[in-house]
Image (spheres, helix red, strand yellow):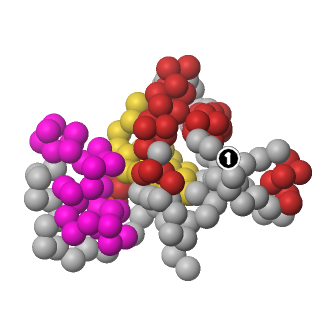
Amino acid sequence: MSNYRRHYHAGGTYFFTVNLLQRHENDLLIRHIDDLRQAIRTVKAAHPFDILAWVVLPEHMHCIWQLPPDDDNFSTRWRLIKINFSKAIDSGERRSVSRIRRGERGIWQRRYWEHLIRDELDLRRHMDYIHYNPVKHGLVASVKDWEYSTFHHWVNKGVYSMDWCENVVTDLVVGERLD
């Protein structure tokens, strides 16, 4: 079995990639976006964190969180978000024998990708990656056209222009392993 190591840092700023188990032709996250938002709100109320950036795609999501200064427990937050979302939607998905034995739903991949942001440049590169992701996956032609993103929040704050990355071929490579 693989030995996964997490880097826990109190008050840390983290980039995450979280995937559905069934990624092929699955739009569960955007179809149930209100349930996902409620799950996040519920967890944030009990275990605060700041959302710096987030994009929800049909079958996976990327985000950047900043944890409180005395807190490094992002694992509990993700576990609760996944549980709350799963409880909010109807069951009936295909489940493996292993998941049935463990009493697990067949919605989420068990693990997720996490990266501790190192500095301002690292933060900016990951924010750019998050906001460009719907274009990268061919969901929209322009970043501004994807509604499940914090892009418009940052446009309003003056960080991005509304036409950011228009007519630009880019290959932002952060946050995902290259095979």
Quarter occupied by the N terminus: bottom right
The quadrant holding residue 82 is top right
Decide which of 158, 30 is in the foreground and name it: 30
Horizontally, residue 113 falls left or right of residue 140, namely right
Is residue 30 visible to us here?
Answer: yes
Which span is picked out in magenta? 131-159
For the point 44% across and 50% down, which residue is it? 31
Q: Callout 1: few (<14), some (14-19), or many (20+) C-alpha neighbours within 10 Å?
A: few
Residue 118 position in % (x across, y down)? 43, 48
Decide which of 154, 38 is in the foreground and name it: 38
Q: Which residue is mark 1?
A: 91
Is residue 65 visible to us here?
Answer: no
Q: Is residue 153 magenta?
A: yes
For the point 21% across and 69% down, which residue is it? 141
Establish if 32 lies above or below 172.
above
Residue lying furthest right: 101
Residue 119 position in % (x across, y down)? 37, 47
Establish if 147 lies above or below 72.
below
Residue 50 position in % (x across, y down)? 41, 31
For the point 52% across and 63% down, which residue is it? 26
For the point 35% across and 62% down, which residue is it? 133
Q: Is residue 94 magenta?
A: no
Q: Amino acid at mark 1?
A: Ser
Residue 81 position in % (x across, y down)? 58, 37
Establish if 85 lies above or below 48.
below
Question: For numbered disc 1, what is the local secondary structure?
Answer: loop
Quarter occupied by the C terminus: bottom right
The quadrant holding residue 46 is top right
Decide which of 128, 97 is in the foreground and name it: 97
